[in-house]
Amino acid sequence: MAIKIAEESATALPDYGRVPIAFLVRSRFRVDVVHHGLGGLRLVEEHVDPYLKDYDGEGEGPSHWQGRWDIAHWGVLSAFEGSKRVGGAVIAWRTPGVTMLKGRDDLATLWDLRVHPDNRGAGVGHRLFARALAWARDRECRLFQVETQNINVPACRFYTRQGCELGAINRHAYGEASDEAQLLWYKGL
Ligand SMILES: CC(C)(COP(=O)(O)OP(=O)(O)OC[C@H]1O[C@@H](n2cnc3c(N)ncnc32)[C@H](O)[C@@H]1OP(=O)(O)O)[C@@H](O)C(=O)NCCC(=O)NCCS
């Protein structure tokens, strides 16, 4: 059945959040620091004992966003196969307090992207990403930013397939207790 992408209002976020975002971590990119960084940072894929990562499981799910942020300038895109919700993308733009937006009106960030596990690998993520780029272009953004982590190797591969380039690696973004590194991907619009 054909996939349709629709823009929704923030009231859809609780339903949006019913699409699971969890995925199995089977490998990660180890960050090697070459010559104290003078030689750059190198990502080396290595296997890990598999575990489930669920971004929603950390009190951060879609139904919490409206209470924490002013989401007046956010875009909510949802993918449907018939009447079944199979995925979604949320774009954050012009949002006070979201430091990664740097107060820039020409920068939009992909806040969330999820495809139902039954529908992954079938092009839904690509369709959502393309619509998210168009959403940002319509608002005259010049740069599209995506945050992920070194433990989300599938998403990193997906973003490179969408034409993104790695712009930053921050090994300290999540505090010293975390063994995850922040990876920021960018695509010019
Ligand atoms: C990451 C995610 C959104 C991708 O959506 P998807 O619908 O599975 O991806 P698509 O089928 O549209 O794939 C598009 C391209 O990315 C590639 N890709 C997708 N998943 C991949 C993976 N696990 N490994 C390698 N490449 C992958 C596809 O091969 C395809 O490449 P092509 O253009 O050469 O055909 C989806 O897997 C998901 O929901 N993951 C869990 C949630 C998550 O990690 N969200 C991102 C948080 S930062």
Image: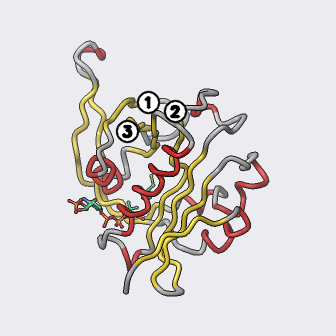
* Neighbour tally class for label 1: few under 14, some 14-19, many 20 plus, Cα within 10 Å: some
Residue tagged 2: 173
Residue tagged 3: 187
Q: CA distance from mark 2 to mark 3?
A: 21 Å
**Residue at 24% over, 54% down:** 47
Q: Are marks 1 and 2 in contact (CB under 8 Å)?
A: yes
What x and y, as percent, mark residue 82?
48, 87
What x and y, as percent, mark residue 106?
54, 32
Q: Is residue 78 above or below residue 71?
A: below
Residue located farthest toward the right when viewing the structure as drawn: 67
**Residue 42 versus residue 114: which sits nearer the camera?**
114
Looking at the rendered image, the quarter that the C terminus falls into is: top left
Looking at the rendered image, the quarter that the N terminus falls into is: bottom left
**Residue at 28% over, 47% down:** 160
Q: Amino acid at mark 2?
A: Ala
Residue tagged 1: 170
